[in-house]
Image (spheres, rainbow, N blue to C red):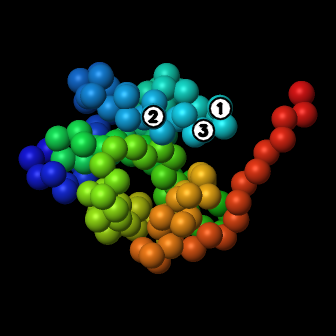
Amino acid sequence: MSSPDLLEAVAPERLPELWPKVAPFIKDALAFNPGDLGLADIAELVMRGRMQLWVLGNVRAACVTELVVYPRRKVCRLVTFAGDLKRARRLEEQMAAWATSQGATQLEIIGRRGWARTLKAAGWREVATIVRKDIA
């Protein structure tokens, strides 16, 4: 993690070492989550290899991804991101290269509408908005 602009995938066995540094970033991002995931859930899913944890440079940002297989495509979903957004936006190419190597054909974000506005200049397009209503 020497370069401030290098995105590093964290191997599950390194999670206990890095969790104290990345948990505050993930907690910040989860403040906008509809309650589907908590910190412990993400840690468990990363440890089991179902999600991937990424850190930027000397832990200036943290991102969690998951590969989602739909019947007609595989996408890399960015589940959470928090930290140095200015640096992290330059890392899309690294993330896309990894996702492509895993067979994904798209990156996907399900999040606040503000992400669509922020990322529009980088070639992202809003294709849907997810809204929910509690019924029980």
* Whether label 3 touches label 2, CB < 8 Å: no
Disc 1 to disc 2, C-alpha distance:
13 Å
Judging by the rendered image, the residue that carries numbered circle 2 is 28
Residue sitting farthest toward the right? 135
Q: Can you tell which mark lies on residue 35?
A: 1
Name the quadrant containing residue 47.
top left
Q: Amino acid at mark 3?
A: Asn
Q: Residue 10's quadrant in the figure? A: top left
Label 2 neighbourhood size at 10 Å, few (<14), some (14-19), many (20+)?
Answer: some
Report which residue position mark 3 lands on.
33
* Residue 104 visible in the picture: no
Residue at the image point whose x is 30% and y is 49% from the top: 84
Give x and y (percent) for residue 72. Answer: 65, 69
Q: Nearer the viewer, mark 1 or mark 2?
A: 2
Distance from label 3 to label 2 (Cα)?
10 Å
Label 3 close to label 1 by CB (< 8 Å):
yes
Whole-percent x and y of residue 18? 26, 28
Q: Secondary structure at mark 2?
A: helix
| Residue 85 vs residue 13, the one in the foreground | 85
Looking at the image, is 136 positioned above or below residue 132? above
Residue 135 in picture, x, y percent from top left: 90, 34
Image quarter hosting the C terminus: top right
